[in-house]
Amino acid sequence: MKVAAASSVVRKNRANTYQPLTGLSASSSSFISSSPRDLSRQERVERASDLAADPESKEVEESDDDDETPPTRFQIVMLFVIVANTLEIGAQQQWKVERYPRLNDVYTGVDIVFVGFYVAEVVVNLINQRLNFFSQGWNVFDMVLTLIAIYNMVAQACEDLQKIDASGLRLLRFVRIFRLVRLMTVVPDLQMVIQGLVQAMRSLFWVLLLLFLLIYVFAVFLTMEVAEDQDDFGKTDYFSDMSNSMLTLVNFALLTEYGDIVRPIMNNQPVLLPVLFVFTLIASFGMMNVMIGIIVDNMSESRKALEDAKKIIDLKTASRRWRKNIHGRGLSAQDVARSDDPKAVEEERNKVIDEILQSLIDEDNSINFPLGLTTEDVISLLDFDNSGGLTHEEFMTGLSRLLLGDPFQLTCLSLTVIGKMRREIAQFDKKVESSMLETRRQAQLVQSQVLDNQTKMRNAQKDILAQLQEIRIVLDSAKLSKET
């Protein structure tokens, strides 16, 4: 980077002081959880650090600015087409051709229109993206479903293909409904729900495994104890063998068929009631609540991920404003150093920075600053080196800390700032103590000099008095001699 020597020294010193707390660079990634659940959030934080990677360079990469682009009109039209096609598939099952033969031509014509839209979408994406088309999973997914739809239409037109495998054709028709998955790309809440369920699958697997083992153990016990007394339950085989016992316990965990099982056991084998109550407490009120808790926890993680993505967009917006208003107007640190009147350019730069911060404070949909915060407060909050101004690095790194820092990171930052203040206070106390010692030494030196001066003055007074006495004696002698 091409920066002035003085600013590079200041920036280097500042990096040495604050870098362990940024949480936004590769060297500080240890502050961010690297577990599989938080991996996506870590990647978003690393992308945010790229915004502050080059503090005052005009050649800032613009590649990430277009990551979060709103859907185009064509994409919105295709989403409506997908929803309409899904409704049409349901209509085909509600009003089947076997019962309403006149609808066969209508369904065929509508399918041709939908397939035409899908083929047009694939062709448009191929033309626009070319070889990059196959690098995106959604494109491959759409192309496969489009080929299935084309094959389905050809199979409906050819009677020979219909005779080959009718169940396979029905399955291919059903596969078309999976296009609804595309809706999660434009509906954040739906995306949050799906991501939460997917993330919960790993933990739920072990809970379900434990529930299966619990059901298996209790099924063995109840089959041994109740299998011979099936007449108490009427014609239903609740505990005749392991399969029926496990199915009964599954329903028991879901609190279905509870009365049909408990009352016969209470009348004939009341000793087994505590066993069933223990199973109900563990399976229904224990395991089920654990599964609900896991799903809720993962939903919260997914919502946090969506909020982090929104914050990344806010950071990109702030970075674009900085580049447009600071770099675009020639007010970067290099421009200030190269200008003929650095003081005037610096004043203009600070004025523009105040405008940028004020715009971020005033916007409701942007960074949610506290009510009543001023631009001076924000500068004090982001000014790491206490220089009175902001650089692009301070601006972006400070905002990234505020928006993306988790409680642990913010606590570390607060404790480190407090530790630095204690260290500075201790250094200030040492300086005060040393200055007081120096002042005391100087005072003692002055006091000794005053005492020496007082001693010299007393001696001088004595000499003067002695001389006056001698003069008086001489005068008296002269007076006596004159009188005689």
Image (tube, rainbow, N blue to C red):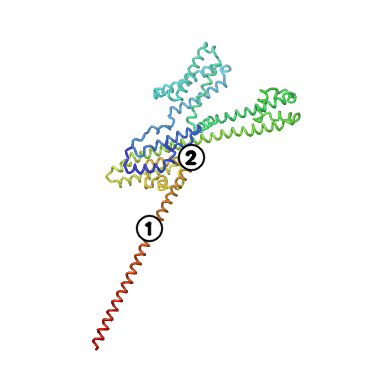
Q: Give the residue at mark 2.
A: 406
Which residue is pictured at 55% across the width and 15% down the height? 166
Give the x, y percent position of residue 37.
Answer: 51, 33
> Could you tell me which secondary element the residue under label 2 belongs to?
loop
Within the image, what quadrant is residue 15 found in?
Answer: top left
Q: Which amino acid type is shown beneath numbered disc 1?
A: Glu
Give the x, y percent position of residue 82.
Answer: 49, 25
Asked whether disc 1 touches disc 2, contact meaning CB atoms under 8 Å apart, the reply is no
Quadrant containing the N terminus in the rendered view: top left
Q: Which amino acid type is shown beneath numbered disc 2?
A: Asp
Which residue is pictured at 48% across the width and 25% down the height? 81
Which residue reaches farthest bottom? 484
Horizontally, is 80 left or right of 281 in the view? left
Within the image, what quadrant is residue 91 found in?
Answer: top right
Which residue is pictured at 28% across the width and 81% down the height? 473
Horizontally, is 167 left or right of 143 in the view? right
Name above or below for residue 220 compared with residue 50: above
Quadrant containing the C terminus in the rendered view: bottom left
Q: Earlier in the sequence, mark 1 or mark 2?
A: 2
Name above or below for residue 365 compared with residue 119: below
What is the number of the mark on residue 438? Answer: 1
Q: Nearer the viewer, residue 315 or 93?
A: 315
